[in-house]
Amino acid sequence: MWWPTRWPLRLPLRFAYDAFGRVTSWTDINGSRYAYQYDGQNRCVAEGGAEGHLSLRVNYDRTDPATGLRVTTTNWPRSGPRWTRSWS
């Protein structure tokens, strides 16, 4: 399903949704596309541009028994940054 909208510069931006209502991609007026992938728990696990200008994968770990925090690790290409966030 496609849904047109406008972002701050007033240029059209089209969103695609899956059967669960999750955004699966957006496409700008130039035809540039950015897509999202989800796991079985409706969490975004990957996203990236069709041209390869940005690509990332997200791993959701279980709660750390020592801290009680949940850890999310995002891995970028070897040449780029890597960061980890924790929250309770």
Image (cartoon, grey):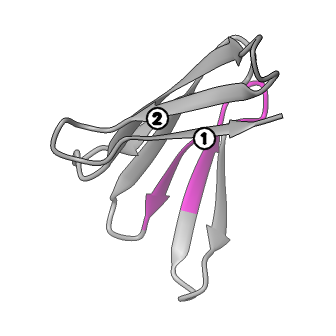
Label 1 sits on what residue type? Arg
| Residue nearest the observer in this picture, 23 or 81 | 81
State yes or no: residue 86 in magenta: no
Q: Position of residue 14 (x, y in %)?
A: 56, 59
Could you tell me if the residues under marks 1 and 2 are in contact, i.e. CB atoms within 8 Å? Answer: yes
Which residue in the protein does label 1 denote? 85
Question: Residue placed at 64% from the left, 63% from the top?
Answer: 4
Crowd tier of the residue under label 1, counting other residues whose Cα lies within 10 Å: few below 14, some 14–19, many 20 or above: few
Q: Quadrant of the N terminus?
A: top right
Label 2 sits on what residue type? Thr
Question: Residue placed at 75% from the left, 15% from the top?
Answer: 66
State yes or no: residue 16 in magenta: yes
Q: Position of residue 33 (x, y in %)?
A: 38, 51
When asked about the image quadrant of residue 5, the answer is bottom right
Q: Position of residue 53 (x, y in %)?
A: 24, 53
Question: Residue placed at 15% from the left, 44% from the top?
Answer: 79
Residue 44 in sight here: no
When asked about the image quadrant of residue 12, the answer is bottom right
Camera-nearest label, 1 or 2: 1
Q: Is residue 24 left or right of residue 43?
A: left
Which residue in the protein does label 2 denote? 74
Per the rendering, the mark at residue 61 is none
- Give the residue at the far front of this rendering: 66
Classified by dominant secondary structure, the portion drawn in magenta counts as strand
Tell me the CA gap for discs 1 and 2. 9 Å
* Segment tinted magenta in the rendering: 14-28
Whichever of labels 1 and 2 marks the residue nearer the N terminus, that label is: 2
